[in-house]
Amino acid sequence: MKVVILGAGKRGTLLARHLIQEKRDVVIIESDPKRASEVEGKLDCMVVVGSGTDPATLRNASILDCDTFIAVTDSDEVNLVACGIVENIKSEVKTIAAIRNLTYTGKDGLPATVLGINYIVNPEAETAKSIHSIIERGIFSDVITFKRSNLVLYNIYVTEKSRFANQNVANCRSTVGTEFVITAINRDDEGIVPSGNTVVFPGDTLSIVAFESDREALFNLLGQHRVKPKKIVIVGGSKIARFLLRSFDPVQLRSIVLVEQDEQVANHFATLFPTLLVVKSDITDETIFDDERFYNFDLLISLTDNDELNIITASYAKRVGVNNAIALIKNNNNYIRLARHLDIDSVISVSEATVDSLLKYLRGAHVSSVHSLFNGQFEIFEFQISSDMAVAGKKLKEINMRNRGIIAGITTEKGENIIPTGAYRIEIGDTLIVCAGRENLGFVQNIFS
């Protein structure tokens, strides 16, 4: 696959890095010469300096030879026009655009035939979906859900007192009275595809796939307890906040408070959501937590456009008694690692949510969800088995993954969720959850092609 990416911002750079790790042929177009030079020094790909709306620049970027064109600049208009020009140059190229403004997309999205765009992603909407999924599951320590399966992935930090500490993976499964699969381990910022003999150490972060119904038992065994929040405070009247609030029904909104310091924005939210309590105030006001009794709330979500403020607010909320806190990262993904050391339960990156959506589309129609793990070192994806796949009818033990990936879960066509063993036979219509290191994705996907 050859991919041309327009825009070397956070989203474009992160997407390019993932695709390069998969050994895809990537070309980036960037109008800012300084940024183009910086990216070219960091990534092993060709960077073309120029405008994505200039046909000559597009041809210099080998648009005639590429399979997919992805426009992820900060300008909706540039993304739209660039896709239209690519469609005019070569209609066979799949075009993808990041579009924020609902004036262009409408509530149901832009039809695929307009301007040659095959797929549209709204960064704010994708981020809101991720946050709402975390809230609905009642878990705040990094939970990943899947579209066709009720199996759930939890990213769990191993402490000295954890029952998993200093145990090998096989013992972890045998000593705990619930079924699960450890799909990946992050140790000192390095990813590990575990085998049964892999030892789990304190300080590791485990990606565990388990039944959603077993989450309480699993978390209790690990010394953690999470409940679905009833009282929520949202900080910042942003677009993401608007998308998130639309995910709740009017009854749920009665238990949610929005804090916004701009009077015009506050009034707008009060009009949009009549059952929502809107507090016009600055969250940094030293008395607001006491005045509004936020310390009695179950969850605080900081969604301002300021990463530093979001991290500080979420961390402070935990210190004064709020049960759980989520912080949004919009501008600098380097803050993600810092935030996780400040007792913040979940950190949501706009860039990562957007790139996951883009990767899902690039994986093909049979893939229903894609999620990156451990800063992109691993990918866990969900796809459905069709009759033309070579693995249909085979037992899992007959599939040689060469320790490059793990089949973490299966949902049958009838909706039965299974933590797999080697004796399970893959059937047409099954949905498989597979985890693999980024550099092994091509190998693993070929097995299931």
Image: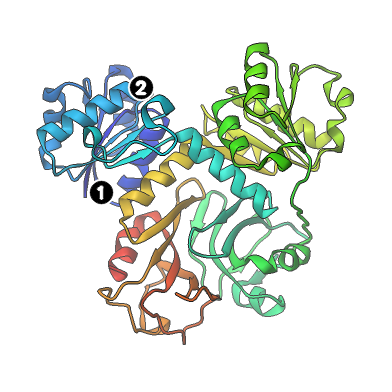
Which residue is at a point 69% across and 44% down the rendered structure image?
345
**Label ID, residue 75:** 2
Question: Residue 401's spot in the image, x, y percent?
Answer: 37, 73
Residue 231 appears in which quarter of the rendering?
top right
Question: Residue 32's spot in the image, x, y percent?
Answer: 30, 18
Which residue is at a point 69% across and 53% down the rendered structure image?
139
Q: Is residue 349 left or right of residue 205?
A: left
Q: What residue type is disc 1 on?
A: Arg
Q: What residue type is disc 2 on?
A: Ser
Question: Residue 166's spot in the image, x, y percent?
Answer: 68, 67
Element on which disc 1 rests: loop
Which residue is at a point 45% across and 74% down the rendered structure image?
413
Instruction: Tell me, yes or no, whether the two marked residues, 2 and 1, touch with CB atoms within 8 Å.
Output: no
Element on which disc 2 rests: loop
Q: Which residue is farthest top?
A: 263
Q: Is residue 206 visible?
A: no
Asked if 230 appears above or below 160 in the picture, the reply is above
Task: Say which residue label 1 marks.
Answer: 24
Question: As rendered, which of 224 and 101 lies closer to the eye?
Answer: 101
